[in-house]
Each structure stands twice: as structure tokens, then as C-alpha cells.
Amino acid sequence: MKSITVNLIMNGKAITQSCATNTTLVELIREKLQLTGTHVGCDTSQCGACTVHMNGRAVKACTILAAQAEGSEITTIEGIGSADDLHPMQSSFRECHGLQCGFCTPGMIMSAIDLVNREAELDERTIREGLEGNICRCTGYHNIVRAVESAAAKMKE
Amino acid sequence: MVQQSIGERVLRKEDRRFITGKGRFTDDINIRGQAYAYFVRSPMAHAKVNSIDVTAAEALEDVIAVLTGLQVAEDGLGALPCGWMVHSKDGSEMKQPHHPVMAGTKVNYVGEPVAVVIAESYIAAKNAAELVEVDFEEIDAVVDPLLAQSSADIYPEVPGNTCYNWELGDKDATMEAIANAAHVTKIRLINNRLIPNAMEPRAAIADYNTGSEELTLYTTSQNPHLVRLVFTAFVQLAPEHKLRIIAPDVGGGFGSKIFTYSEETAISWAAMKLGIAIKWTAERSEAFLTDAHGRDHVSEASLAMDDEGHFLALHVKTTANMGAYLTLFASAVPTYLYGTLMAGQYKTPNIYVEVDSVFTNTTPVDAYRGAGRPEAAYLLERIVETAAREMNLDPVEIRRRNFIQPSDYPYQTPVALEYDTGDYEASLSKALEMSDYSGFPARREEAAARGKMRGIGISCYIEACGLAPSQLAGSLGAGVGLWESGEVRVNPTGSVTVLTGSHSHGQGHETTFAQLVASKFGISVDDVEVVHGDTGRMDFGMGTYGSRSLAVGGSALSKAADKVIVKGKKIAAHMLESNVEDIDFDDGVFAVRESNLSKTFQEIAFAAYVPHDYPLEELEPGLSEKAFYDPANFTYPAGTHICEVEIDPETGVVEIVKFTAVDDFGTIINPMIVEGQVHGGLAQGIGQALLEACVYDDTGQLQTGSYMDYCMPRADDLPSFDVGMTSTPCTHNPVGAKGCGEAGAIGSPPAVINAVTDAIGILDIDMPATPEKVWRAIQQAGRA
């Protein structure tokens, strides 16, 4: 497989990484850059566990080639906050018990941040529809919806 | 001091790592120099394997080895075991086919592995797998469980493809009561096969050290110690003391990560054979094909009543589909976890349950959230609802009329179980109030004015959790003990490390168990760390399944903590120059009764490890205690779920407009976590009722093998839930807990279907009640 070099901004840091031409963005993130917070839960671009931000918008990193990310700004779950300085969405997921096994959580948080950034007004229906691309098998979504409502209020302050 | 104790909504200790991307799931782990595995799987449901040619695959660059099922057989690896022997009506043992680690000469379901490629990279392994030439000779597949017993035998050792014909209860009395009853309600229903779909696909890394001859396996397991036991006692890979099994963060299980599967076994064998580390991670497509499925029953039942709707007798006849092989709990699910639940919350005097368990050329079936108990609750609550409608009785009234009353405990059912405690009227009336049941007719009228069909459905379920006691289970065929172990290590500075044999894969044990132990010692939850999932760190553990962790594992920890307190009192008595009988321990302080002499928990911990002022002649240093807890009985959570739906007659789309769940889980440690468990169970139960179905075609090809075909509940498919609690603490464990993990999935499917049929005005519809089925039912009912 031919090799290419990809230049991008990963969580605020400029990186240059060589990889095979068919490397997906999620493979680049997990296998090359060892950022394992972004997960792979399916092979049909349905579950959303791999959701990251590309130039500020949520994308499913399993469905984008690393080459397509050339020159872009990528943010993963590791890039939005730290244990000592949580993003409001992260803290709301904890406060509202919006996670159980934690596997879908990073992707869910990245989608939810994008949803709040995009939508001026969010109610339960728009939150549920906005998270339709992320599957959670543990929570029944009830507390995820509460978490997004709570974070949206904090983020708009 | 921040002290958070039992009953408080303590935020979860484990969350911080998951919300920051610092969780450590199996696929996040890499071993330096590891190779990668990719499995060659059967594309056919039933076929002879005439030959396997690995020449081209082995010749590919970066391929280390290609190992086949024939080599598994040559190496004499034992079969993957089932953990429960069930006997047929005639007393004979169940028939079970040999379940090889990889298939040798015959494959029995689509996805069964026949070979594994080991290569330097994942992509090389996958590419090489494409080059493995397998000559399959297709045989007619047995797919429909109802035709299994009249089809050609899949295995010579299993005549009639029948695993067992099991029975429970008094047949003669039941049949006689049915024959003489004023009214008999009959139903036939299907409990649809489900695919568990934990969000983390299964994965494993086997790391073999040729020098020490030790194998470390990282694996997505709910019960790592059982994996170790299976590897040693059944597959005979290596002795237990040379095996370390680590189940790190595990992304959901729901039963599907109980079984010790082919893949982790095969790569462990390969790693030992080749002297290397090997990693395997399932793709979701592989998960659909090979994770043990759930449910899949076809049942007929008759409920006999007197003319006032008092239940006289229940006869149930069920065909349970095992798939191609028996998995760990497969044989117990439709028998001891199903037939024994047929009394439900009711005083039905005569019950007789018959179960034919059959093999088909489909993926093996095992425990899935509830495991047998959802199937029992679904049957019972559907037939009770149908009976109420046939008898023109209010569905609430017919249930009340038959409830076991608080004065009846302990209550011996006619199907083996003895309920210790409960209060079914309490959860029913609370659910009626929360759901504004009495206001329903007005809401139905209002919906009708908008052109919507509104219905309401009730389900009063019971479940039996914390399978036990070991001796009884052993006499009924269980192959393992059913206790749990726990260890409470008080560190010299007074913080506490708790080791548990239970495994958390979303349940929040790191918080709940910390609360339990912290409240025992009067210390902060932050000073307690819970460790689980590593055979190298704790003695033994039976793992997590069947909502057992708090009731059984928590009880073990409670006992271990009590031992710490007993020892602490002895140390305190010495230090305070008092008698041990005069020492009280309360809120973190050991004090001499009726004095101002005292020592803190931390001071005692320090003294235990720095024993300068210490009764060394009577007491060993250190402050660490273990306990094994074997319960005296099952626990019996129960509750009432009420579902209210609106159906659009134009499209058949069912919307759940209100869902109320009131559950009695006994003592609750952390209500936030318990409510979360209910929410998740409800989502899976509603998924079963409205969305999810595993479908095979006539040749045994899985038609629902991806998220494009298998309808997973998504955020916009579900409502918010109204969850309430009542409590009658379990009488026989020290925590008083009953278990909460499965209730949602048990109580909800019948509530949803009872609501759907109520809305349409029919008696029956199959799960999942998809828009198409609902629309057709509406057309047939002539009410569109």
C-alpha cells in the first residue's frame, strides 16, 4: 500500500504523520496517534462511537480518510477538556449520569457539543433527533438528554 | 470529612476517565510486538468442510501462521462448555454437541470459525484470510425451531435435534384444573430472537511469555475468573496458576460477554503455540454473527380461572431455540430461569411447564438481559391481560384479585421458588398513581379527536436474581458455585482498597461498592477504591450476570468489612486498655462505651501495620479481610410497569407517550445508578417490543447483520421514563438488596404490547410491533 503524509492540527497541535493511503481518520487517531478515547463500534458508519470534530463540526471518523483531513483541525474527546478542567458537556454527562459503560460516551459528547453549537433552541425532541446518529445501549438515552439540556444551558451562559 | 453513604446519589467515581477519553478498553491496549488475528468463518449455515488450503494465505507477506480447526483437534483442545446440566422428563441427561474451539470437519452456523490467520498487521491478516481456500459442501440447514425436531439430525449425538424435554410442576393437577375450569384463556406467542449489541465489540489480546510459561489474556469478559476456569478445566490450555485473565474496562455486556468464546480461546492457544502476543478485535459484522443471541422462544399457554377470574392453573409449553451449540447458560435460561418464574406475582395453585429445547443451524443463544425471566414475564403478563379482556375484567382488578399478599411470605410457589418478601399492591398502586391511570379514558378520547389510537398496558413482573444457593443449584445441574468473593484491604493510612469478584461493565460498581464499604467504616467514598476484573488481583469471582453483583458480591464485601470491624475492635481494646466487649464502632470511631476514650478508624489501621502498641501475641498484624458469600435463596425484585402509546393509524407508527416503571429492588445504595439501570433495561425491553428482531432466511443466512438491518433503539425512538421505587428489603442477605439490572427489560415488553393491542382493540400482535405489522393489524381490525 502506498504511503502518504498527512499534516493536520490535532487537539491544537500541528502534526505530520505518514500512513497508508487507505487509512481512515479513526485509524490515524487510534493506531498512529494513540488517542484511544475515540472508539470504533461498528463498520457501517451507524453507531457514532468514533465521532470527532473536523473544523468544528462533528464527523464520523470511520468514514473519512486520513487524507481527507489534510490541513484540517481535528478535535477528539482528549482535546475538549481535562479531568481538572472539564468541558461543560463532560461535566454534565457525569452530573446527570449520562453514561454507564462509557464506550459510546466520547462520541456522544462530541456529537452533543456540535448539536448545541449548531442549534439556537434545543428541546427534548431536537436533542433526541440530533443524537440519532449515536447509539447507546446502556442508558436508554434518558439521562443523556438531561445531560445535553444541562450542558446547553451552561454553554450558552 | 465528606461522607456519602447508603441511599445517596453519589456521582460515579468511574466517570472521570470515560468522559475524558481515558477509559481503557481491550482494544485500547497494545503489547509491544503483538501480532494480529483475523478469523476465517463459515459463509454457510450447515456444511461439511472437505478441505482447507492455506498455502496462498501463508505465502502472503507478513503472515506468521494460519491455524485451522483440524489443528485444534490434533492438539486435543477440549470443547467450549455449557455450565448447566438439564435433565429431560425421563431423567436422561440433556444432549449436547461437541463445541469445538474452531470447526474441523463440519460447520453448523454462519460465522463459525474454521481457521485463524496470524500476521504482523491487522490488514495483512485480513487480506490473507481472503486467500484461505475452504471447500465447503453445503448441507440442508435446520433454521425454524418448530421444524427442528422433525428435520434431519444436525449431530449424530443429538437425535431429533433435541437438547432436552424438560418439565416442572404438577402435570396431572394442572391438566385436571384446566379441564374443569369455568374459563380457560389460551395464547400462542413468539419471544423474538435478539442480538445483544453491547457497544464495545468483543476483543482479546493473548500475551504468552515463553520464559515464565505464563499467559496473560486481556478480554471483554463479564467474568474473567470463569474464563480462566474454562481454559484450564475444559479446554485444557494451561493450568490456572499460569493464566492471568484481565477484563479491563468493558463496554457493556448484557449477557453476551459471559461465554468463553472461540476467538479468545483460539488466539490464546495460538499465542502459546507461536510464543507471541496476539490481538483480535471483532468487527461489528462479526459481532452480529457470533455474539451469543438472546430469547427465541415459541410458546403456547392456557390459563384456567373460576368465573370471578381467580387463577386456578397455568400450563405452558415452550420450544426454545439453542442455536447450533450450547453456551454457558443456554440450557438454564429456558428452564430454571424461566419455568420457575411462572407464578409471577400470583397465587396460581397449579402450574405445569414443559420446554423442548432444540438445536438449529443458527448462532448459539445464551443469557441476554433478563435471560428467561423476560420470556416468563412476557408470557404471563400477556395471558393475564388477555384473560382480563376475555372475562371483561379490569386488567388492574384481575391482577389484584390474584396477588400474593404481604401476609403470605415466605411464599412457596408451585414451581420450586420460595419468595422471601414483596409487596405487589404497593408497586401497582404507586404506578397507577404516577401514570394517572384513572385519567386514561379522557386522554384516549382526546387522542381520538386528533385521529390517534391511544392504548394503555400494564405488566406486573417478578424476577429471580442472584442465582443461589450453590448446593441447591448444584443439585439442579449447575456446574459451578454461585457465591461471590470480596476482599477489603485497609491500607496503613486508612484508605481502603476493595477487591471484588463481581465485574462492572457499566453498572457503576466502583461507586456503589465504595458507598457500601465507606458507610460501613464511616469514611469518605473518595477514600475507597474498588478493583475488579483481574484474576491476578483477586482470589476468585463468579463475575456479573443475573443482577447478582450487589446482592451477592456486595454481601461478600459487607461480610468482609464486618470482619475488619471485629479485628479493629480487638486492636482498639488493646490500645485503649479496655475489653473488646466494651468497644463500640460507629461513624469511623472505635470508642470505649461510656467513656471519652477512642481511636479513629485511621489510627487503628496505622496501628495494625505499625504494631508497636499491639496485641501481637493474640493477633496478627495487618487489616485486610476476605469473605465468600453464598446466598440462602434467590432475591425477588418485582414491580409494575405501565405503558401508554399513541398509534398513527395512517402509518402504523407506535409512539410511547408515557412509560411508568415502579420497582421494588429492596435496599438501594445509589438511586441515581439504580434509575439508570432501569432506564437502560426499559430501552432494551421497548426495543424488543417495537424495533428489534433477529431474522434468518430459510438457508440460515442472517438477514439482520448490521445496524442498517437490525433496528437498534436510538434516542428519537424512546421517551423519557417515569421511574419510581418501593422497597421491601431482601430478608436473607446482609445488604437487603435484590438486584436492579434486568427489571427494565423484563417488565416492559408485555406492558408495551398490552398497550398496543389495547389501542388497536385486538388481542394479539407479534413483537416487534413494527409500523408494518401494526398497520396491517389495524386494517384487519377494520378500524383504519
Image (tube, coloured by chain):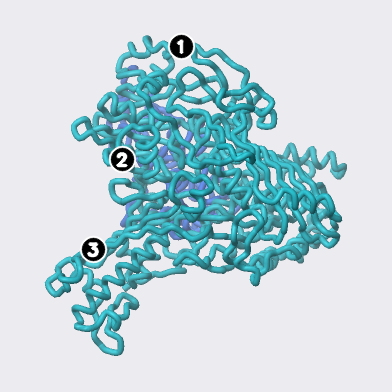
Chain colours: A blue, B cyan
Q: CA distance from mark 3 to mark 2?
A: 28 Å
Amino acid bearing label 1: Ser
Closest to the camera, between mark 3 and mark 1, is 1
Q: Dot 1 falls on which chain?
A: B
Chain that bears disc 3: B
Q: Is residue B677 left or right of residue B202?
A: right
Query: Looking at the rendering, which quadrant does residue B461 occupy?
Result: bottom right
Q: Report crowding for label 1: few under 14, some 14 to 19, many 20 or more residues within 10 A (C-alpha).
A: some
Q: Does residue B107 appear in this view?
A: yes
Labels 3 and 1 share a subunit: yes
Q: Earlier in the sequence, mark 3 or mark 1?
A: 1
Q: Position of residue B575 (x, y in %)?
A: 19, 79
| In the image, residue A89 above or below residue B65 | below
Marks 1 and 2, how far apart in space? 35 Å
Q: Is residue B733 above or below residue B96?
A: below
SS category of the residue bearing label 1? strand
Q: Which mark is residue B491?
A: 3
Closer to viewer: mark 1 or mark 2: 2
Neighbourhood count class around disc 2 (C-alpha, 10 Å): few under 14, some 14–19, many 20 upward? some
Q: Earlier in the sequence, mark 1 or mark 2?
A: 1
Which amino acid type is marked by label 3?
Asn
Residue B317 locus on image (x, y percent): 70, 42
Horizontal arrangement in the rendering, residue B482 relative to residue B487 (left or right): right
What residue sits right under mark 2 in the picture? B240
Would residue B749 be found to the left or right of residue B294 on screen? right
Q: What label sits on residue B51 in the rendered view?
A: 1
Q: What is the secondary structure assignment of the residue under circle 3?
A: loop
Figure quadrant of the N terminus of chain B: bottom left
**x then y, percent, for residue B754:** 73, 51
* Observer-nearest of B611 and A156: B611
Residue B211 is tagged as none
Subunit bearing disc 2: B
